[in-house]
Amino acid sequence: MMIDPIALFLLLLSASTPILFAALGELVVERAGVLNLGVEGMMIVGALSGFATAYYSGNAFLGFAVAALAGALVALPFTILTQFLMSNQVASGLALTLFGLGLAALFGKPVEGVRAPTMTAGPLGLNWIVWLGLAMVPAIWWFLNRSRAGLILRGVGENHDAAHALGYDVRRVRLAAIAFGGAMAGIGGAFISVATVLQWTEGMTAGAGWIALAIVVFSNWTAPGVLAGAWLFGGVTVLQLRLQAAGVRVPVQLLSMAPYLATIIVLVAISARQKFSRRAGGTAPGSLGQDFHALR
């Protein structure tokens, strides 16, 4: 079996785009010191809202804009729970995932079985959203490492008490970060329904949000690392599909589980690396997952 490496790489770019968007959004959220496990829920809401908008308006790009807005809005309850009511971030994130899955299943029935409008292709035949995702990598790297706003966001994530003492509004920074993360997850979900599958199916994100969460840790909380992680999982997915299409005699179930198996292997590697990182001072944001109370 001959596999064209260029065609395989282009497929990899497309397959990794949903996870890339979701992971970049979660990267900014975690850099602000918030652990949002609701990425899967925001992605599925983005997939439905983006697809429904594209179908009824006939404009796929409008679908992506609405998906970003829907992702940011569905993250709002998480913001209120964790930043104002001091609810546990892990429990609130899991609740957001369940809420998003249920919401999408409830309102997705009318658009089941219909087809999304076709999008015009960009350079090299890739979707314009793929290029947008690639452009977001250096943009977010520059924001986090070279801009004043990014420095404040990282300061809030590393030590929210010190940032508050210096006069920065910790809640406002985190609210903006969570909304951005929701918008990015929404676009990632919409890419699956509007640009890849071209249909809406209940549960179609299939755990992509969880993989995005793992990639953020795997990336050592850096934008280039997120890109490398997304390409790794996208590559495994494309290779799995190519092997299935070529009729390779490997059980389909084993091929289908390959991307998730890769996730488990990476997580094991992360666990081993974190033991070393703790001895070296750790790499995770210092206030990640911790509640902030302005009066303490």
Image (cartoon, rainbow, N blue to C red):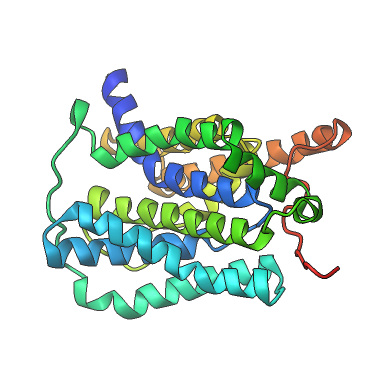
Q: Position of residue 100 (x, y in %)?
A: 45, 71
Query: Which of 3/34 is in front?
Result: 34
Q: Horizontal placement of 235 versus 117: left or right?
A: right
Query: Which of 158/233 is in front?
Result: 158
Which of the 4 quarters of the picture holds residue 152? top right
Question: At 42% across and 56% down in the image, what residue appears?
Answer: 183
Q: Horizontal placement of 212 versus 132: left or right?
A: right
Question: At 85% across and 34% down in the image, what residue appears?
Answer: 281
| Residue lying at the far right of the rendered structure | 279
Q: Position of residue 215 (x, y in %)?
A: 57, 42
**For residue 138, above or below residue 182:** above
Q: Position of residue 71 (x, y in %)?
A: 41, 63
Q: Horizontal placement of 245 versus 32: left or right?
A: left
Q: Is residue 247 visible?
A: yes
| Residue lying at the far front of the rendered structure | 167
Q: Is residue 240 visible?
A: no
**For residue 177, above or below residue 78:** above
Quarter of the image where the C terminus is located: bottom right
Q: Horizontal placement of 60 versus 15: left or right?
A: left
Question: At 17% across and 68% down in the image, what residue appears?
Answer: 113
Question: At 39% across and 58% down in the image, what residue appears?
Answer: 186
Q: How many marks?
A: 0
Quarter of the image where the N terminus is located: top left
**For residue 17, above or below residue 83:** above
Q: Position of residue 91 (x, y in %)?
A: 66, 71
**For residue 226, above or below residue 210:** above
Which of the 4 quarters of the picture holds residue 277? top right
Query: Which of 260/220 is in front?
Result: 220
